[in-house]
Amino acid sequence: MPSLHDCRLYGILDLGYVKAGDAAQITREMIEGGVDLIQLRGKNTSITELIQLSAELHELTATSSTPLIVNDHAEIARRVPVDGVHVGQDDDNVSLARQKAARPILIGKSTHSLEQARAAQGEGADYIGFGPIFATPTKPDYTPIGLEHIRRVHAELNLPIFCIGGINIDNLQSVIDAGAKRVVMVSALLKAHSIVDYARCATDMLG
């Protein structure tokens, strides 16, 4: 499995945008396009379905050594050999997520300010999501934090930081110019005419 420090493009397979039945094919396309890290997110999907789907997807990601992260439910890691769990501000803290997983895994945390980013590092998160940088249909209730804090959060923290929120090919260069080294794409990637080509374009820009 690659080091998180070497990862650049993080793709989220959000079941709010895609059908569970299409998840395997989309995962294959993400892998072919060079996505470094894949997260399965299903906010309105039962944990039983998520366990079944994450097991299916892990068979695909394991063959390419692409880490598979599940959103929210750390207990899935007891049933499926996923590589990590991602928690939000309103979910389990990092230590509780590790306890529920009951084995060594990656734990990522969503942060929406410098203060939350510092706190996540203090909790022992392996990486953070930092955003939303721009307005995003995925999280319409969140106020964008903009580009201004990207350089500072990289200077203050020593763990991998993935900028997230409304990032697409058209605005990616501005995010990179603001100091980002890693980004998350959700709707832009999932709605792309060709996920493979879109991911390749993004990874080329990220270097």
Image: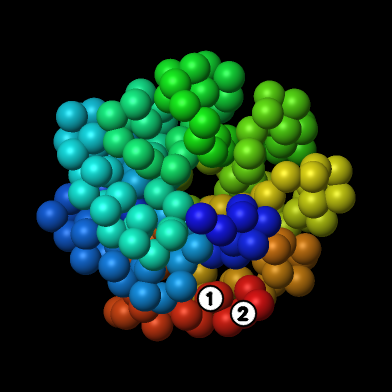
Q: Find residue 188 and report its horizontal and vertical position in percent.
A: 41, 66
Q: Amino acid at mark 1?
A: Ala
Quadrant where the C terminus lies?
A: bottom right
State the image coordinates of residue 197 (x, y, percent, origin top left): 40, 82
Q: Is residue 148 visible?
A: yes
Q: Name the residue nearer the viewer: 51 or 41.
A: 51
Residue 166 coordinates in the image, percent (x, y): 51, 59
Q: Which residue is mark 1?
A: 202
Q: What amino acid type is highlighted by mark number 2?
A: Met
Residue at the limit of the structure toward the left, as seen here: 21
41 left or right, relative to 44: right
- From the viewer's perspective, is 85 left or right of 193? right
SS state under label 2: helix
Q: How many marks?
A: 2
- Residue at position x 76%, y 38% from top? 114
Say which quarter of the image contains residue 47. Answer: top left
